[in-house]
Image: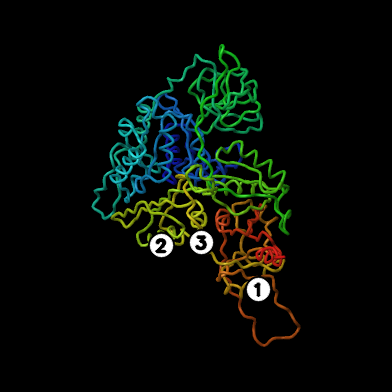
């Protein structure tokens, strides 16, 4: 299960071909205007393919806009009289916590791998988790099944990918039974799966089109039914127990706790206790509603038994990794908590606090540190990979996550909810070396395994940049088509700035980079990213084209003149942008990158002086280059140690921590000697 290998599209086809979702008629397609809401799995930018809504599992607005899966989601289908529960998981390493928390609900894994790219770092991560969580200790027929997706592409190389997959299974310590996994070739986009590679077309043309023998997903359905065991090992005669893996909110019934029933039968009206990992009772309640999933719909049930994935309403003080049990029926023994999948530690941290810039309070509606604190702690209850700690001051918090993208999605969500906040630069989480024989004071830092797939002519530049950031090469493999696969170990802090945009420039858009946490290793030394100085505004007001034009020779600008261009976040509602987008600058705000290593103070607000003296020469035409507009994640990775990112509903600005240049220069010199 790897980035952009087609998991969500594959689930789309299973939902379609099982008849779970219907095909829209031509009239319905014309009239179809979905509304984005928390209770709907369809958002306004849904594409329609042959009458079907695509990517129906990606219900989050951010998922739709970015084209990625962020949250794990459950659904079910009926096929030939069998109920099949399906869990769609993210592919990005930053959202690995979503994969870890749902593994307790499944009895089998379909490993979806791109037939061209082959197994990547995230493939290794999810497969190792699937094997370690207990799937390999269950019946032998619960081996992972492998789907080589995008097998219809001319660039597909199934023989090499199969070899790489077998090596991966062997590296992870798979048993002989697990290494003998079933394999299917599929095209989720075209809607077919088969057990043999598609053959090249024999139409006499020079095209390299591959023609499949199958026309639907029946081979995959049959393999799931024969390969994944039914949950017969779960005992319905025991009292009810269920591990909560996800919390949902409903405006009518309140909090819903989702999980798979481990033992027993639950009915509406039962009294249920909530116990934590130590077995301590933390909450209770009477079951008001039981919901199951069928396609995109939530089906209400009166009772549910072991093996079913349900959402339960009516419990107070529940939470993630909390076990729900019947209050009675356990005999002399007290109810025991169910084991949960351990979560890998976070590797990146940032500090957040309320916005205190000169423009604070002009765009957002939620401004105080207490409101920010309450919202973040509420998020930590459901986001298992997020850790919240007190900050250096009473007004700040430290957020720890899996990566810049993981934390960036949280900050983007807060921004859209109307929050204003300031964020410090992301830092790798360092820990002291626990080895008693290690030198005193030695620190360990998180090391990432980085996999780069790039055209051969650009590989040298990428390897050089990663080596400068303390990376160590593990393998370098080139194929006949001119593509190179490079695997390197690199500190997490070395990837922060490089992945934000520099990588895309180095590979000219022809390459991908993926990474996954590997281990904590001794600190590898300082990294010089080579970033130039900043262009810092020394005036407050609205920037003008007259002032910006001569400043372009000093570096790259980050801003547009007032009243020109678009806001950097066109995904927001138009009403919000037109009402709150403010192009103003203030002293201490970073408005560009200098062409030199030192910071330069500039005035972008100068206006041309108008006089009543007539000029013989016509005014010179002002030509402005397009500014560099960075996304939230790019700005987080770009910022320096003495800078903050100011986040508001309509703007993301870069600024210095100390706005006053005199105080900043005095702080840089240090305290005066007596």
**2 or 1: tag closer to the N-terminus:** 2
Checking the image for residue 547, the label placed there is: 1
Give percent across and percent down for residue 201.
26, 48
**1 or 3: tag closer to the N-terminus:** 3
Hey, which quadrant is residue 478 in on the image?
bottom left
**3 or 2: tag closer to the N-terminus:** 2
Front position in the image: 577 or 638: 638
Q: How many other residues sit within 10 Å of disc 2, few (<14), some (14-19) or many (≥20)? A: some
Q: Name the residue under label 2.
A: 461
Circle 1: element type: helix
- Whether pointer 2 and pointer 1 mark residues with C-beta atoms closer than 8 Å, the reply is no
Give percent across and percent down for residue 416.
64, 48
Residue at image coords 63%, 46%: 398
Relative side of 572 to 473, left or right:
right
Checking the image for residue 361, the label placed there is: none
Residue at image coords 63%, 42%: 389
Relative side of 363 to 438, left or right:
right
Circle 2: element type: helix
Front position in the image: 20 or 666: 666
Q: Please, is residue 115 above or below residue 547 in the view? A: above
Give percent across and percent down for residue 545.
64, 71
Residue 381 shows up from this direction: yes
Hey, which quadrant is residue 256 in on the image?
top right
Front position in the image: 592 or 642: 642
> Which residue is situated farthest in the right direction here?
612
Q: Quarter of the image containing the N terminus? A: top left
Frontmost of labels 1 and 3 is 3
Relative side of 430 to 536, left or right:
left
Q: How far apart are marks 2 and 1 (CA)?
A: 36 Å
Checking the image for residue 529, the label placed there is: 3
């Amino acid at each position: 299960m790897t980035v952009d290998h087609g998991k969500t599209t594959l689930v789309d086809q299973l939902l379609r071909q099982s008849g779970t979702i219907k095909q829209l008629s031509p009239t319905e397609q014309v009239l179809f205007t979905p509304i984005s809401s928390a209770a709907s799995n369809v958002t306004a930018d849904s594409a329609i393919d042959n009458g079907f809504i695509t990517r129906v599992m990606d219900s989050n607005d951010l998922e739709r806009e970015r084209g990625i899966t962020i949250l794990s989601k459950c659904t079910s289908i009926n096929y030939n009289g069998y109920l099949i529960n399906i869990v769609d998981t993210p592919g990005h390493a930053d959202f690995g916590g979503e994969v870890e928390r749902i593994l307790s609900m499944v009895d089998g894994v379909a490993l979806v791998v791109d037939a061209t790219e082959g197994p990547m770092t995230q493939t290794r991560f999810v497969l190792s988790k699937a094997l370690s969580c207990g799937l390999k200790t269950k019946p032998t027929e619960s081996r992972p099944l492998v789907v080589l997706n995008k097998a219809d592409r001319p660039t597909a190389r199934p023989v090499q990918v199969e070899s790489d997959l077998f090596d991966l299974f062997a590296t992870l310590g798979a048993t002989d039974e697990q290494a003998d996994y079933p394999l299917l070739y599929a095209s989720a986009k075209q809607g077919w799966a088969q057990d043999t590679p598609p053959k090249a077309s024999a139409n006499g043309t020079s095209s390299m089109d591959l023609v499949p023998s199958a026309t639907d997903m029946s081979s995959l359905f049959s393999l799931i039914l024969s390969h994944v065991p039914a949950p017969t090992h779960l005992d319905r005669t025991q009292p009810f127990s269920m591990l909560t893996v996800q919390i949902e909110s409903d405006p009518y019934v309140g909090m819903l706790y989702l999980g798979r029933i481990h033992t027993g039968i639950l009915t509406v009206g039962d009294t249920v206790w909530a116990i934590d990992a130590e077995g301590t009772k933390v909450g209770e309640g009477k079951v008001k509603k039981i919901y199951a999933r069928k396609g995109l719909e939530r089906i209400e049930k009166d009772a549910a038994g072991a093996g079913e994935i349900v959402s339960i309403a009516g419990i107070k003080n529940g939470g993630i990794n909390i076990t729900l049990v019947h209050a009675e029926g356990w005999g002399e023994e007290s109810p025991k908590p169910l084991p949960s999948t351990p979560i890998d530690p976070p590797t990146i941290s940032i500090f957040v606090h309320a916005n205190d810039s000169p423009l604070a309070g002009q765009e957002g509606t939620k401004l105080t540190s207490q409101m920010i604190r309450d919202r973040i702690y509420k998020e930590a209850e459901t986001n298992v990979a997020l850790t919240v700690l007190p900050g250096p001051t009473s007004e700040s918090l430290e957020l720890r996550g899996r990566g810049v993208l993981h934390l960036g999605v949280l900050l983007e969500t807060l921004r859209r909810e109307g929050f204003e906040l300031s964020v410090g630069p992301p830092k790798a989480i360092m820990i002291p070396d626990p080895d008693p024989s290690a030198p005193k004071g030695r620190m360990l830092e998180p090391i990432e395994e980085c996999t780069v797939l790039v055209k051969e002519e650009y590989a040298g530049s990428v390897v050089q940049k990663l080596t400068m950031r303390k990376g160590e090469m593990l393998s370098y493999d080139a194929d006949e088509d001119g593509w190179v696969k490079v695997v390197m170990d690199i500190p997490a802090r070395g990837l922060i700035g490089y992945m934000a945009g520099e990588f895309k420039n180095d590979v000219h858009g022809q390459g991908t980079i993926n990474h996954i946490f590997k281990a904590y290793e001794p600190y590898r030394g300082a990294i010089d990213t080579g970033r130039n100085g900043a262009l810092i505004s020394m005036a407050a007001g609205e920037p003008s084209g007259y002032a910006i034009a001569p400043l372009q020779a000093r570096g790259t600008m980050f801003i547009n003149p007032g009243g020109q261009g678009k806001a950097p976040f066109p995904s927001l509602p138009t009403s919000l942008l037109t009402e709150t987008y403010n192009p103003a600058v203030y002293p201490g705000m970073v408005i560009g990158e200098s062409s030199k290593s030192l910071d330069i103070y500039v005035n972008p607000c100068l206006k041309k002086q108008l006089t009543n003296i007539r000029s013989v020469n016509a005014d010179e035409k002002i030509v402005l280059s397009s500014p560099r507009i960075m996304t939230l994640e790019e700005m987080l990775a770009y910022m320096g140690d003495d800078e903050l990112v100011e986040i508001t509903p309509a703007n993301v600005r870069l600024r210095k921590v100390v706005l006053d240049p005199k105080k900043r220069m005095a702080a840089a010199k240090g305290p005066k000697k007596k």
